[in-house]
Image: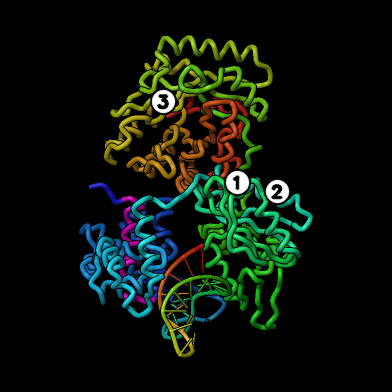
Amino acid sequence: MADPTNSELAAILDELGDLYELDGAIVHRVVAYRNAAKAVREAPVSVARLVRDGRVTELPGIGATLEEKLATYLATGAVPALERLRTAHPAGVVAMTKLPGIGPRRARRLHDELGIDTLDALRAACESGRVRGLAGFGERAEARILAGLDAEDERPRSVRVTLPAALDVAERIVAGLRREPAVARAEIAGSARRGVDAVKDVDVVVASEDPGAVVAAFAALDVIAATEASGDGGARGLAHTGLPVDLRIVAPEAFGNLLQHLTGSKEHNVRLREMAVRRGLHVSEHGILDDATGETTLCADEPEVYARLGLAYVPAELREDRGELDAGFAAPALVELADLRGDLHCHTVASDGRGTIEEMAVAARELGREYLAITDHSASHGFGNEVSPEALVRHMAAVRAADERVEGIRLLAGSEVNILPDGSLDYDDDLLAQLDWVVASVHSSLRMESEPMTARLLRAVRHPLVDAIGHPTGRLIGRRRPSAVDVEALIDAAAQTGTFLEINGAPDRRDLDDVHARSAAARGVRLVIVSDAHRPATLVNQRWAVLSARRAWLGPADVANTLGWEALEPARPRHRVG
DNA sequence: GCCGTTTTCGGCCCGACTGTTTTCAGTCG
């Protein structure tokens, strides 16, 4: 039997946390389970293996009790406490706690006092007016629950938009506000500033002595459709794209405090405040209160907040409580878009792209790239415009001819080859050997079970002519779950063969994600940051992969295409010995 | 349930908002 994945073990801990919360455990115990779940989910190695090696308590937040529970799960496939709690608290009650305005206490009372144990029963109780009879609930509560249930029915997933769409709105807002005389400073905050995969709203922080003028200017921006809840502290608006926008306004002397607070993450801020308390300091968006003197320090700039706490400044992308507040932390030099010298994944009209070879080459050159691999789809793509082996021979010649014509950029003849369900590739080796760059990707049968899917990808990794694995998990943010591939096994294999793994910059891919990319780099895997552009304008999509890489703590040395082609070419797997 | 310049017990971030409330618990970010 295969080991359970980290995400499977994390899900068990999260469920235990939810159930203990319903069971009335003190909040700190619940938080302990959730912290442990986070540590397991983000662990760079197999947690199941750590458990078997007796090393799992090395993870932050895992102690003897949770080690025991995890070991029991590995040995028996079950956790007795979990089974008992599941019996005591029906799944429907847990689901109720996910509705807005319903937490564990209220869910528990709905169950205990009205016998409600499903979402359907909750709806019926609200519609018949039985909920308002409960102390602490009123008509407003009933209406809110019904609204929450309706929203649940309409949208199974929370409304989130990918980062580029959110940043487009946010950057327009900030640019517009900066033109206002009343605005001293304006910055994007929140999860968008941290560069996460998808966001549910946008936060903007403004420094000003004249909040009224700022709110008026905000409401007048052409990207803003409507505003509500305006006041001196800020306003809540809705962009025409449907994205909610929170504007917060603060006096310039406390701008750093509010920007730090609203940038988050919540987990980062909680850890930051815990560390501050040990120094007798209390951090909030209003300043830093010193127990000893009773004085509050205001910080005009964000770095002052970290300095006042005796901490190294933390770049926004790293603020996830993944070790960035540990003793001895010094911000690593993170990879930047300008460090990238080439792009190794793009398409042209030869397959499903919208630009010619030359158009893509010129656009990449204008972005400052020194080389560009043309990697059209292979022979069994299934979406039309397939490149047969004969067509690929002609295409290679066309790329090499274009390389002669276009000055200032090196064009590489490549292909994005399909990894077939059995792990084989859909071009012959003698053809692949003629290419400068081969990226192998899964485009079909994405829902295979974990073991065959992993075996499929491992076979491709071990193919000596495969340079890189494209979008390794196949996820589409908000639309398609990652495939069942065991990414840890994939990383181990790539570390052995020297095969590169992509961080694909298509806005809805960003695949590998930040957690896996960090894990890969930590185990010596070489990563490439690519655009997967399908037209000249989307070559800029490397930007999104750079953000994922930064969230993965990667520096220029972790990313192979910060090298020139003359250095990268001999480093391809096909030249490795052994 | 975890953890330690408060180390094996006694703490565990901070503030705003909401609705229902006569002083605040629960929820949220």
Is residue A354 one of those drawn in magenta? no
Q: Quadrant of residue A446?
A: top left
Three-letter code, disc 1: Val
- Estimate the spatial distance between the alpha carbons at disc 2 and disc 1, rounded to whole Å: 11 Å
Residue indicated by mark 2? A176
Residue indicated by mark 3? A464
Q: How is the image coloured?
A: rainbow
Q: Position of residue A3 (x, y in %)?
A: 28, 50
Q: Position of residue A506 (x, y in %)?
A: 50, 36
User: Which of A46 and A517 lies nearest the eye of the viewer?
Assistant: A517
Looking at the image, is mark 3 or mark 2 earlier in the sequence?
2
In this picture, which residue range is highlighted in magenta?
A5-26
- Which residue is at 46% across, 30% downward? A468
Q: Tags 2 and 1 in contact by the CB under 8 Å rule? A: no
Q: Quadrant of residue A465?
A: top left
Looking at the image, is mark 2 or mark 1 earlier in the sequence?
1
